[in-house]
Image (tube, helix red, strand yellow):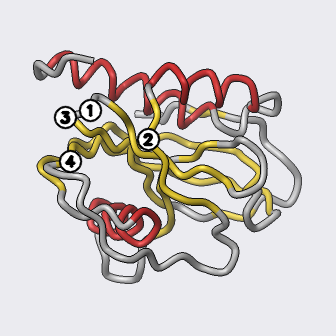
């Protein structure tokens, strides 16, 4: 079975597989995202996995490191896609097999973040419409199409399992 492919292939792409999470708070009906310190770009919490770490564990570790959120009630796999994108934080072209997860929070309790030097963003809460509009407006080069895909899948999954959005 072939994977869905998003983005525009670029020269000199580096391969870096990983996961990303659409994080939902059922109490507020808002989604947790990273808001870049400069500009208006919103981002999913995401990253590569460590040796010996499975994709779900690695993705949840990235959510906690990047947002401080840690009180997860449920994690639902959304599938894997191929994504071509420019990583703006590292200024590098990437191609990756990206596995998406819907993460439903038990609470908004946070621990201290463990951001790397290049990670210049902070936790923000937004509606799905706000996030979708942000990515559509900034995705001229289709860098965020795979995030849009995972957000749309998450919305469908939330409705399917009975959450009101």
The numbered disc on residue 105 is: 4
CA distance separating discs 2 and 4: 13 Å
| CB-based contact (under 8 Å), mark 2 and mark 4 | no
Measure how far apart labels 2 and 3 are at the Cα level: 12 Å
Measuring from the top left, give residue 115's x and y in whole percent: 54, 76
Q: Which mark is residue 27?
A: 3
Q: Nearer the viewer, mark 2 or mark 4?
A: 2
Q: How many marks?
A: 4
Query: Image quadrant for the C terminus?
Result: top left
Q: Which residue is mark 1?
A: 28
As displayed, is residue 12 above or below residue 142?
A: below
CA distance for labels 2 and 1? 9 Å
Q: Residue at x 44, y 27 (%)?
A: 127
Q: Secondary structure at mark 1?
A: loop
- Residue 41, image x and y in percent? 69, 43
N-term-proximal mark, 2 vs 4 = 4
Examine the rendered structure and indicate whether residue 13 appears above or below residue 61.
Answer: above
83 up-or-down from 129: above or below: below
Q: Residue at x 41, y 45 (%)?
A: 32
Residue at the outermost right position: 11
Q: Where does residue 128 sit, x and y in percent of width and height?
A: 44, 25
Q: What is the secondary structure assignment of the residue under circle 2?
A: strand
- Circle 3/circle 1 CB separation < 8 Å: yes
Disc 2 marks which residue?
Answer: 125
């Amino acid at each position: 079975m072939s994977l869905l492919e998003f983005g525009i292939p670029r020269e000199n792409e580096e391969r870096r597989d990983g996961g990303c999470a659409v994080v939902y708070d059922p109490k507020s009906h808002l989604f947790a995202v990273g808001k870049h310190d400069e500009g208006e770009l919103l981002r999913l919490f995401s990253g590569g996995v460590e040796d010996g770490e499975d994709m779900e564990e690695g993705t949840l570790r990235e959510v906690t490191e990047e947002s401080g959120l840690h009180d997860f009630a449920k994690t639902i796999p959304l599938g894997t896609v191929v994504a071509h994108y420019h990583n703006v934080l590292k200024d590098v072209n990437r191609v990756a097999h990206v596995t998406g997860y819907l993460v439903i929070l038990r609470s908004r309790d946070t621990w201290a973040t463990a951001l790397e030097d290049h990670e210049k963003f902070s936790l923000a809460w937004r509606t799905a419409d706000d996030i979708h509009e942000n990515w559509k407006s900034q995705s001229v080069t289709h860098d965020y199409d795979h995030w849009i895909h995972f957000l749309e899948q998450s919305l469908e999954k939330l409705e399917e399992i009975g959450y009101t959005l």
